[in-house]
Image (tube, grey):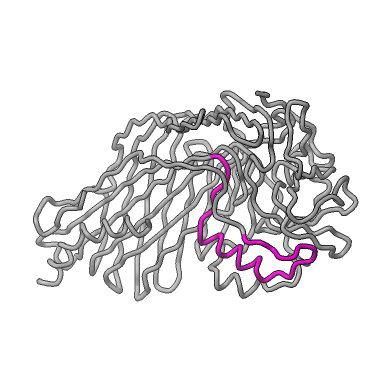
Amino acid sequence: MRRPVRGRRLLAAGLAALLLVTGCGGPTPGPADGGDGGQPRYGQAPAPGKDVTLQPDVVLVGGGSRTVRSVSPDGLTWRLDPGARDADRLAPGRVMFLTGRGVGRVLDLAESGGDLVVTIGPVTLTEVIRDGTFGGDDVALDHPTVYVAGEPSWTREAAAAGGTLGRSRPLAVAPAQPPPAPGGQAGATAHGYRVRTFCCAGGVGTHFTYDDGGVRLAGTVTLTVGRPAASFHLAVGAGKVTRAELEIGGGFGIKVDFSAGIDGGQNHRKAFPIPVDIAFPIGLVAGLPLSFTVSQTLEVATAFGARRGTFRGAGEYALAGKLGFGYAGGQVGSRVTEGFARRVSLLDSLTGVPVGVMGLVVRHGVRFTMGISAFLFTAGIWFELVTSYGATIGSALGAPYALCRGVGLGVHARFGIGYRILEPVVQVINKFLSLLSPSRAPRIPPIVTSGGPSWSAPVYRNQEVIPPVSICGQLPG
């Protein structure tokens, strides 16, 4: 019995290590681009009012969604009608502003098959807007439109993606993004996982499954919410943000359920954005087509101490009444009204047949952004809540003496003005860009992981181990 006892004593330390390594203009409706049935496939065209000044290198390309022939799944490459108004003014280094979802720094241009092929990268709000004030109160988040990226390069590992992206021109023949659809549900694949998103009745979340190489995982992570509504305010002067506020109300909680098993497989760690935008078009605000977008990230790390075993668990907790932050005069503060309460204990629910110690961390990020552009390049005022669920269960070989169980729960807030992209995703994109032969640009520069200021704040953290006996150890504080 020595080996199982030693394994149970390592339970607390194992859980702690897991958690560490996974380490004013108001909105007004604007005209839809013709032929789109009131829901432009690629976003609404801008019509800046007299109270808004754009940066001098911004090019407003005419025609809106009608100008777009197709967009690559990764969002990097836009095929346009070369005869569109002011399309001839586009050049590497300038900012293309075509629609609310088609905004980006031009990295390169090429002609292909009668189309103008534009490769873009992300921009911050102040790289687009020089002066302007924008605001909206109690914007109901109840009729979402779902945009699915398809199968972009950044949903695959860097090595796999690089092997298929060696083109001399940006996507001369490329699959197009699927058309948008009403409702909050959509399916996608990323890094070997099948995911299905949902929003917004009852919450925002993702169901995920993975079955490969002897490892099988399934689960659902949810940021629960009643009837969400958002308020925002943004003031930009001389190319600098002087005031930014974002608040989402509705009463929030967190919820998880999972099952995990291994049969001769190996541990893995995957972290990726879900390739689905859940969007709530606000309309033209001071002439700019702003949208409220919900996006998600998922990270899963396994730490199975045996070649075979299974375990499962479920938990639910009340968290906060409101989420958000405010920035003014160089000062920033989180606006999370905390109200943590346990509804269903994840710790008490842990069961399974583990031959050795088994551990799992699931990290779920939900980001709310009021702004422009799409998918990874969405930029604006943003608030992200990241919840980490860590669970370990001791070996069943020692169960007659004590079956140790441990849970770690951490909730962290991130917020900012601009954009933020996961580092592994940026590596994939930059590998793709490095393989392209530039047409008009002397070189295609790499993109960076973030633009604009950002901050973070802890919301909640707790760790527990049962039963309270010495061999199960104590989780470090």
Left or right of 460? Residue 385 is right
Left or right of 12? Residue 311 is right
Snapshot quadrant of residue 238: top right
Q: Is residue 34 magenta?
A: no
Q: Position of residue 72 (x, y in %)?
A: 71, 59
Residue depicted at x 72% and y 34%? 288
Residue depicted at x 73% and y 53%? 93
Determine whether 117 is above or below 279 in the image: below
Q: Nearer the viewer, residue 80 or 243?
A: 243
Q: Position of residue 346 (x, y in %)?
A: 29, 47
Give the position of the N terminus as an image quadrant. Answer: bottom left
Left or right of 59? Residue 269 is left
Residue depicted at x 57% and y 48%? 451
Residue depicted at x 51% and y 58%? 423
Q: Position of residue 160 (x, y in %)?
A: 57, 72
Snapshot quadrant of residue 99: top right
Q: Nearer the viewer, residue 46 or 192?
A: 46
Determine whether 383 is above or below 328 in the image: below
Q: Is residue 434 magenta?
A: yes
Q: Which portion, as a residue range, is magenta? A: 417-446
